[in-house]
Image (cartoon, rainbow, N blue to C red):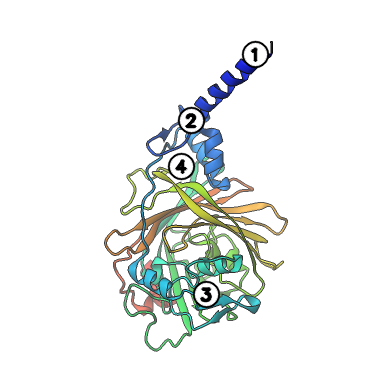
Amino acid sequence: MRNVLVAFFILFFVYSSSLAEEYKIESGITITEHNYEQYIPELKRLLIPSAFPTVINGLKEGWINVPVIEKGYYPAPRGFAEFTRKNAGKFKVGKDNMLVGEKWQAGLPFPEPKTGAEFGWNAYRRYCNEECVFPKVIFWLFNKNGQLERKFGFNLYRKFWFGRTDIPPVPEIPGNNGKLNCKEAIVVLHPFDVKGFSMVRIRYEELYKEDDVYSYIPAIRRLRRLTGADVTDPMLGSDACYDDFEVFRQKINTRMSFKFLEVKDFLVPKHYNKRPKEPFIKRNCFQVEWEIRPSWVLEMYENDPNYAYSKRVLYIEKEAGISNCHAGENYDQKGRLFKVNTPIVWARDDVTRLYGWFGGLYKDHISGHTTVMDLVPYWKNPMIPLDKFSMKVLLREAR
């Protein structure tokens, strides 16, 4: 009897091992509506947690499939990589989250981060393709069943005055003298009921100085100044707010605290050198190729009862050397998972190594409502006139 039991457990172990090997997610396989169930344990292990239900539902409904490819090599833009290399050992995070050391010019302040605060500063100083950028954007709004409710389009302008690495002048626009970090503007072009909505955001380099944010609201024909609460409100009924663009657009402040959790492999969209094949957007999902890539997982605690979130969890690309975020999960003041940004589909030009992005998902985890951000980056055109950050010019553009 004992020999029979031993033989049974050996056979069971061999059978289980063969199943695990058969259903392992690796490059070369494609997960579809017909075989996704056998990959559910692996998808749960490899997908960023907030992406799991969206991807599983997309597979179940037959909207998407998940082709898994070999992990790509994505070097940082040359100038950014050089500034990052030169920053080694120059900085530390001091009291009130201040960056202490030499004057920061550009690149990641911590080439080899070790503490949560250092990861946080790298996320804040990550490479942003918007040294000068002009993407055309469409927001697609889907209900919890994946049905399209509406869409609206806008132009987005962003220009950095400081921290520039690859588009001259480097590292700062002459005459700025460390005052401005960047300016950003949007102007909505369609549909008619929101046409002309415009926003200008001015970010100062000084850590303690809050952003200036102004918005023109066509419905009341008034220009208003926005507060910190307004920049976490949904944008025109969507699930995206200004502080969540590119997952993390918020300015580091003195109240935040950080906790580095782990390095882990995740299944994330590849970095594309041209727009993914159409149709790119499949309901509230992206039809893209996926890679298994290592990411840092960072928790950021807001410690501010007046802010929309109590905590953020960032999933930060480890190998590309730019600290771009694959996804983010944001918790409300009651500790509930609230807004999630996942996945981000990154764009990369193979010649210049400049980065952009082709899309992102903004989902209200409580209601199930999703906004898909679909855009075309124009990183090769650095000449954005300064008057693009004027309300008068933006409104003229919307006519």
Precedes in sequence: disc 4 or disc 2: 2
Separation of marks 3 and 1 at Cα, in angstroms? 78 Å
Which is in the foreground here, disc 3 or disc 1?
A: 1
Looking at this view, is 375 or 100 the one in front?
A: 100
Residue type indicated by callout 2 = Glu
Q: Nearer the viewer, residue 90 or 61?
A: 90
Q: In the displayed structure, does residue 166 sit left or right of residue 115?
A: left
> What whole-number distance in Å separates the C-alpha atoms at marks 4 and 2?
32 Å
The percent coordinates of residue 386 (x first, y second) are 37, 79
Disc 4 from disc 1: Cα separation? 55 Å
In space, the residues marked 2 and 3 are separated at their CA atoms by: 56 Å
* Label 1 sits on residue: 3
Whole-Å distance between the Cαs marked 2 and 1?
A: 27 Å
Under mark 1, the amino acid is Asn
Write the residue at 62% across / 75% down. Answer: 97
* Nearest to N terminus: mark 3 or mark 1: 1
Disc 4: which residue: 283
Q: Position of residue 201 (x, y in %)?
A: 49, 74
Tag nearer the camera, 4 or 1: 1
- Residue at the disc numbered 3: 214
Q: Which element type, helix, strand or loop, lies under badge 1?
A: helix
Looking at the image, is mark 2 or mark 3 earlier in the sequence? 2
Q: Amino acid at mark 3?
A: Tyr
- Are the residues at dot 3 and dot 1 in contact (C-beta closer than 8 Å)? no
Q: Earlier in the sequence, mark 4 or mark 1?
A: 1
Mark 4 in CB contact with mark 1 (< 8 angstroms): no
